[in-house]
Image: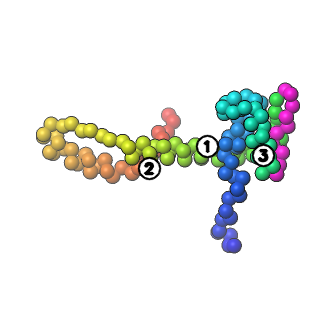
Amino acid sequence: MTDCEEMPLPAWISDLPALDLLLSVAETGSVGRAARAHGITQPSASARLARLERRLGVPLLVRSRRGSLLTPAGETVVVWSRTVIDAAQNLADGVLALRADRQARVRISASLTVAEYLLPAWLRCSRTVTTAERCSKPSAP
């Protein structure tokens, strides 16, 4: 394999819900609170996180009765996971926008003069706007 070729992603990288759950544990400090935020039970959340730890091969959390603390490896995985989860959310938002765009309809009413002289140029102009431009999020002020 050359330096330019990328290796396929490992199977555990596809467990985005578990990574998202880990982010919630980091934010809330509790597996139980993170589970509630995700609409799952605490035992289910604990099982997902334990499976993620096994798949990654590193301990992510130190659990106690007072909450859960990230291990140093867990803190690092959380930092990396934020980027991955944000990208996944952008992908989901973009796909939903594309779906909505395919279903979007515009009804135009215009006087005869506007319809005959102005509307053709406006329609040509609107067709030049790319899907990416229509689907991009406005930047924050």
Q: Are marks 3 and 2 in contact (CB under 8 Å)?
A: no
Residue placed under numbered mark 1 in the picture: 86
Task: Name the residue located 68 percent from the left edge and 72 percent from the top edge.
Answer: 2
Query: Which residue in the rendered view is the most extreme toward the bottom?
Result: 1
The colour scheme applied to this rendered structure is: rainbow
> Depth check: 33 or 116 in front?
33
Quarter of the image where the N terminus is located: bottom right
Q: Amino acid at mark 1?
A: Asp
Q: Is residue 28 magenta?
A: no
- In which quarter of the view is residue 113 placed? top left
Residues in magenta?
57-66
Q: Residue furthest left?
A: 112
Q: Mark 1 vs mark 2: which is more N-terminal?
A: 1
The earlier-in-sequence mark between 3 and 2 is 3
Residue 114 in the image: x percent, y percent?
16, 40
Q: What amino acid does circle 2 point to?
A: Ala
Q: CA distance from mark 3 to mark 2?
A: 37 Å
Q: Where is mark 2, residue-wise? A: 132
Q: Give the structural element (helix, strand or loop) at label 1.
A: helix
